[in-house]
Image: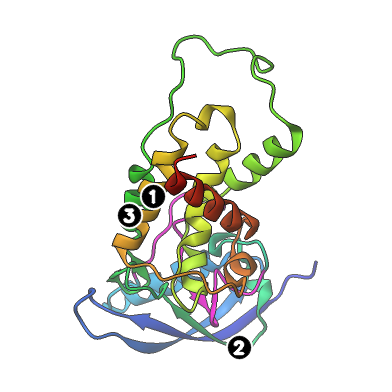
Amino acid sequence: MQHYTMNLKLKVWRQQNSKSEGRFEVYDVNDISSEMSFLEMIDVLNEKLIKDGGDSIAFDHDCREGVCGMCSMVIDGRPHGPWQGTTTCQLHMRAFKDGDTITIEPFRANAFPVVKDLMVNRGAFDRIIQAGGYISVNTGNAVDGNAILIDKQNADDAFAAAACIGCGACVAACKNASAMLFVSAKVSHLALLPQGQPESKQRVAGMIAQMDKEGFGSCTNTYACEAECPKEISVMNIARLNREYLQSNLGS
């Protein structure tokens, strides 16, 4: 793939904290390599801002390997940017061309208050996980992998659901800021396995109650969450979540 450099105009959301009024500020960045990651491009801009005595742009990042789920940005109207199945840190500048104007915003949801600039507080997801409680397992030496037989389809579906990294792109993509895809993935990967059965009813009831308490909206059934999920979590998990919740209420 041919390497090239580009000059870009960035419209970046700046906001001091959740209580202050935000605004877009425009920055020019020059000689950006097509092989840079999107976050490396922001690093270059921040170095320039600091050198000029300005305030650097705050954004979340950690592993920069598409694993931690922290790099939450809306880029040109899409959570994590234009590439399918990709986190912001995995997005490379070859997705853009010389002279482009790129708009960069934080995830927008009442349940994700802005910490500063492009950083949001996604502690609501942590509290939903905590509301799910625990699973009953034997501690000590690892058991043999074949000790509990699990249907191949269930094992595959559980593995796919467990791939959720809790980034919040599903919330940012949904016009109702629904967390149903996230919650359904966390419920599904245990509901599909024998180890998750003893606490299954309490788990789904507790997590949905906490989700509602945090102020997330209802599912829109538009599949925007699945379309923007960097791990391509299926909306079929939402159907499973609804079934699990119904069964918990029926006491069956």
Q: Earlier in the sequence, mark 2 or mark 3?
A: 2
Residue type of the residue flagged with mark 1: Met
Q: Nearer the viewer, residue 170 or 54?
A: 170
User: SS of the residue at dot 3?
Assistant: helix
**Residue 89 at least partly seen:** yes
Q: In terms of secondary structure, what is the magenta stretch mainly?
A: loop
Q: Which residues make up the magenta segment?
A: 58-83
The relative height of residue 165 versus residue 83 in the rendered view (above or below) is above
The relative height of residue 100 versus residue 185 in the rendered view (above or below) is below
Give the Cα separation between the discs numbered 2 and 1: 42 Å
**Residue 73 at least partly seen:** no
Residue 247 relative to residue 16: left or right: right
Residue matched to label 2: 100
In the rendered image, residue 231, in percent from the top left (x then y), is placed at 62, 55
Give the Cα separation between the discs numbered 3 and 1: 5 Å
As for residue 62 lying within the magenta part, the answer is yes
In the rendered image, residue 129, in percent from the top left (x then y), is placed at 38, 46
In the rendered image, residue 162, in percent from the top left (x then y), is placed at 57, 43
Residue matched to label 1: 207
User: SS of the residue at dot 2?
Assistant: loop
Residue drawn at x 33%, y 43% as measured from the top left: 130
Which residue sits furthest right? 1
Residue 210's disc is 3
